[in-house]
Image (cartoon, helix red, strand yellow):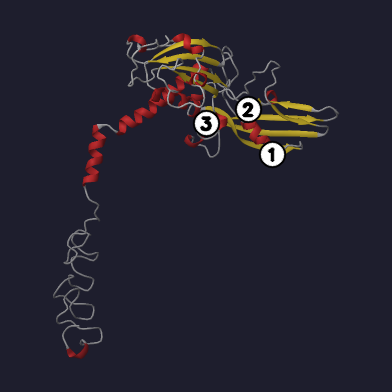
């Protein structure tokens, strides 16, 4: 694959990648001029946040095998499916459909039966086929590899993982809905089988000097990656502030996508996450957020509710006065002819004068 590095390697001070070995399912490279935190972030992103395709729903039409429906559904979910052009597929949660459609899912079918044979019939992943009537997606015939959603077959016999075995008069017929997801949700969406990660093969940073069980040389032996670095010399002054800046990475994929695609997608995902953080920390957003925090919480402006003014443009719902002809406040009449509100002196109750002949309560 040809890459446009956009001048990444023009500056020796930035991160650099040297590919040492690559195959269709694995890639070995050296990541240098970077920090342990960044290298580990890339590794974790490759493991857990690169989107792939996996069977998420299984509709069983007929199952007379010895395996339960739930057992088969779990086994089908772990079958690797091709994630070619996965960016063209939407997440189900982002799609406008009710359940699933051709824009967010791929439908596969499986129909196997043992009618008359006394021998056990084995059902493999190769027996899964894409339901062409469900989707309008058609892959280019010139491209290599299986189409999106097809089972990834990597064994020499071309069978793929074993699903179940059928004895005489047993049948398995089901419909599988594959959806887009990431390994943070479930391990079946993981694009990698393993990622080896190593640094400091000569133990130049003396990791085992103060913490080892029997022999520090046996617990940190030189690896094959030691040939990429010069060993420390006897008598060299030890730098206590030195940190690892060269990492040896080996990506082993599951076949759902090439290892280099896994790495490039992980970089894009990490860039998007960091861009979100940078955007939220931008000065304009920070200033607006601080202004919101500077204003104390308050209720809606009810103006002067002790007088005639109200929240309804200085008047009550029935005009400038109260429903009985006077404004709320001292000196006005109540429903029974007396003062309303806080006009206690001179008022009367609905039954006449106040108790004991007084003017107020």
Q: Mark 1 points at which residue?
A: 69
Picture coordinates of residue 356, whole percent (x, y): 20, 90
**How many labels were placed on the picture?**
3
Say left or right for 281 vs 264.
left
Quadrant holding the C terminus: bottom left
Camera-near label (1 vs 3) is 3
Residue furthest to the bottom in view is 356
Q: Is residue 1 visible?
A: no
Q: Name the residue under label 3.
A: 183
- Asked which secondary structure carries label 1, the reply is helix
**Point 21% across, 45% down: residue:** 294
Residue 341: name its quadrant.
Answer: bottom left
From the viewer's side, name the closer residue of 31 and 215.
215
Assess disc 3: are there few (<14), some (14-19) or many (≥20) residues with their C-alpha within 10 Å of its C-alpha: some
Sequence-earlier tag: 2 or 1: 1
The span from disc 2 to disc 1 (Cα, nearest Å) is 16 Å
């Amino acid at each position: 694959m040809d890459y446009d590095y956009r001048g990444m390697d023009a500056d020796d001070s930035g991160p650099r990648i040297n590919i040492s070995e690559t195959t269709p399912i694995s890639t070995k490279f050296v990541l240098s001029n970077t920090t342990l935190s960044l290298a580990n972030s890339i590794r974790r992103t490759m493991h857990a946040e690169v989107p792939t395709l996996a069977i998420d729903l299984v509709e069983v039409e007929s199952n007379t095998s010895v395996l339960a429906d739930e057992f088969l559904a779990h086994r089908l979910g772990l079958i690797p499916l091709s994630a070619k052009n996965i960016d063209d597929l939407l997440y189900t949660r982002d799609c406008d459909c009710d359940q699933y459609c051709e824009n967010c899912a791929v439908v596969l079918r499986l129909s196997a039966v043992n009618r008359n044979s006394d021998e056990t019939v084995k059902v493999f992943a190769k027996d899964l086929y894409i339901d062409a009537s469900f989707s309008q997606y058609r892959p280019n015939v010139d491209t290599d590899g299986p189409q999106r959603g097809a089972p990834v077959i990597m064994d020499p016999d071309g069978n793929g993982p074993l699903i179940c075995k059928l004895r005489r008069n047993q049948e398995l017929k089901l419909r599988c809905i594959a959806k887009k997801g990431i390994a943070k949700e479930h391990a079946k969406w993981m694009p990698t089988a393993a990622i080896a990660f190593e640094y400091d093969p000569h133990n130049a940073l003396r990791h085992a000097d103060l913490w080892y069980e029997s022999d520090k040389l046996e617990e940190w032996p030189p690896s094959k990656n030691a040939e990429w670095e010069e060993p420390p010399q006897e008598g060299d002054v030890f730098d206590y502030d030195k940190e690892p800046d060269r990492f040896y990475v080996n990506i082993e994929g599951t076949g759902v996508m090439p290892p280099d695609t896994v790495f490039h997608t992980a970089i894009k995902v990490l860039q998007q996450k960091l861009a979100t953080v940078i955007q939220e920390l931008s000065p304009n957003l920070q200033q607006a957020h601080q202004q919101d925090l500077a204003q104390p919480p308050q209720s809606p402006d009810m103006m002067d509710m002790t007088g005639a003014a109200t929240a309804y443009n200085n008047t009550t719902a029935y005009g400038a006065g109260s429903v009985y002809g006077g404004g709320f406040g001292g000196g006005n009449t109540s429903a029974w002819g007396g003062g309303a509100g806080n006009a206690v002196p001179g008022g009367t109750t609905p039954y006449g004068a106040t108790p004991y002949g007084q003017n107020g309560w």
